[in-house]
Image (cartoon, rainbow, N blue to C red):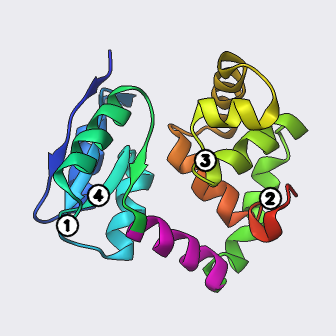
Amino acid sequence: MLHAGAVEMAAGVPVAAYALTRYEGRWFVRAPVLTTFHLDEYVFAALEAGASGFLLKDTPPAEIAAAVRAVAAGSEMLSPAVTRRLIAEYVGGRAQPQRAEALRRLEVLSDREREVLVLIGRGLSNAAAARTLFMSEATVKTYVSRMLTKLGLANRTQAAILGHAAGLLEGGQVK
């Protein structure tokens, strides 16, 4: 059973995120990391370890509460500043060595799964993606679940990062 909560970490964010999200190889808690450290290596490591989000302490309290509720409902949440940095990092050139590998990993996806991945990468909820693709929210959830399974990923945030690494969101078109 998965439980949701928020975690505040002063140091060792990647290690703490990993410890909170895994137990004997299984996911057991969904948690956004709340920290003052806006270091790229902490963001990447926490998300790769399975954190369900990354929020900075300057995030307004109402948004922190909304993030915890979103995580409890199965979504992920990133601070806008973190989202901008993640996108800039991949668009700015770090992705070049990783792009070919990311594209190779995405070869297993159907065209529709790739469309859903692009929408996730743009931050759309399942409901918004369903409206965009003219399908039910349940169908979008099925595509997301299949996509995560095929890619061996734990959550939508990891899928979005992979989509960005592959360059799927450049130019506003599905590639």
Secondary structure state at the residue bearing disc 3: helix
Q: Residue furthest bottom?
A: 92
Nearer the observer: mark 3 or 2; the answer is 3
Residue 26: x and y, percent?
38, 27
Nearer the observer: mark 1 or 4; the answer is 1
Q: Earlier in the sequence, mark 1 or mark 2?
A: 1
Of 117 and 136, the residue lying toward us: 136
Instruction: Describe residue 175's horizontal placement relative to residue 117 as left or right.
Output: right
Residue 119: x and y, percent?
69, 47
Residue count near mark 2 (Cα–Cα under 10 Å), binned few <14, some 14–19, many ≥20: some
Residue count near mark 3 (Cα–Cα under 10 Å), binned few <14, some 14–19, many ≥20: many
Q: Earlier in the sequence, mark 4 or mark 2?
A: 4
Distance CA(mark 1)–CA(mark 3): 26 Å
In the rendered image, which residue does mark 4 sit on?
55
Of 17 and 6, the residue lying toward us: 6
Secondary structure state at the residue bearing disc 1: loop
| Quadrant in which the N terminus is drawn | top left
In the rendered image, which residue does mark 3 sit on?
159
Instruction: Confirm whether the magenta stretch covers residue 165.
Output: no
Quarter of the figure with residue 43: bottom left
Amino acid carrying mark 4 in the image: Leu
Up/down of 42 relative to 2, above or below: below
Q: Which residues are magenta?
A: 81-92
In the rendered image, which residue does mark 1 sit on?
58
Distance CA(mark 4)–CA(mark 2): 28 Å
Distance CA(mark 1)–CA(mark 2): 35 Å
In the rendered image, which residue does mark 2 sit on?
103
